[in-house]
Image (cartoon, helix red, strand yellow):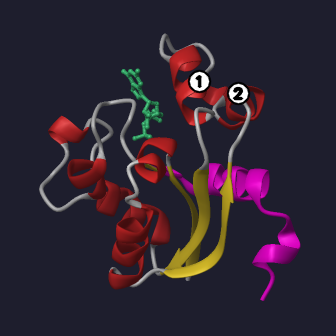
Amino acid sequence: MELTFAIIKPDAVKSRDTGRILQRIEDEGFQIRAMRMRHISQSEAEGFYAVHHERPFFASLTAFMSSGPCVVLALEAPDAIRKWRTLMGATDPAKADAGTLRKEFGASIENNATHGSDAPDTAAFELGYFFPGIELAR
Ligand code: GDP
């Protein structure tokens, strides 16, 4: 079993797609191990996306991520990191495969509905950024 970190981003919460995305998560076989709704500040978004701070879209991305509440999740499944990235689809919804969450719920390369860790080290950092260890303990 593996844990990954996921976000239902502010665009999808605002468009009232949270429930549909949670249903897809469970239908695809993930166990929700932890979940919280949270409206993060821009500085909290900057800390979360620190690896992207040199990217030209950093200011816009962190403003978007702090524009409204999001839902943060710890998801468990065999091969959860790769499986969740596959379910999300490509970063740009226009390039995402049919049936993926970003294709169905994303509007643009920035407002793309969901986030998922891309590797074990980022999953560990991102899970720890939002969830104290006690919430993930068995
Ligand atoms: P991800 O791993 O698929 O989420 O993609 P990245 O790590 O490359 O980018 C992080 C997030 O930044 C994406 O999910 C988008 O919300 C946003 N993003 C990525 N590329 C662009 C871009 O070219 N322009 C803008 N405005 N936002 C972007």
Residue drawn at x 35%, y 69% as measured from the top left: 20
Task: Report the side of 64 relative to 92 (left or right).
Answer: right
Residue 78's place in the image compared with 38, above or below, is below
Which quarter of the figure is the C terminus placed in? bottom right
Relative to 103, say whether 111 is above or below: above
Give the secondary structure at mark 1. helix
Where's residue 108, x and y in %?
29, 31
* Magenta span main SS: helix
Closer-to-camera residue (75/19):
19
Residue interval drawn in magenta: 115-138
User: Is ligand 1 closer than 8 angstroms to the Cβ of mark 2?
Assistant: no
Which of the 4 image quarters holds residue 65? top right
Tell me the residue at 32%/30% (across/down): 109
Q: Is residue 125 left or right of residue 68?
A: right
Check contact, mark 2 vs mark 1: CB within 8 A.
yes
Q: Amino acid at mark 1?
A: Ala
Q: Position of residue 2 (x, y in %)?
A: 57, 75
Q: Earlier in the sequence, mark 2 or mark 1?
A: 2
- Residue on which disc 1 sits: 63
Q: Amino acid at mark 2?
A: Gln
Residue tagged 2: 42
Q: Can you say which quadrant of the picture contains the N terminus?
A: bottom right
Q: Residues within 10 Å of mark 2 (few under 14, many from 20)?
A: some
Under tag 2, what secondary structure? Answer: helix
- Image quarter for residue 112? top left
Percent x, y of residue 27: 33, 83
Q: Quadrant of ligand 1?
A: top left
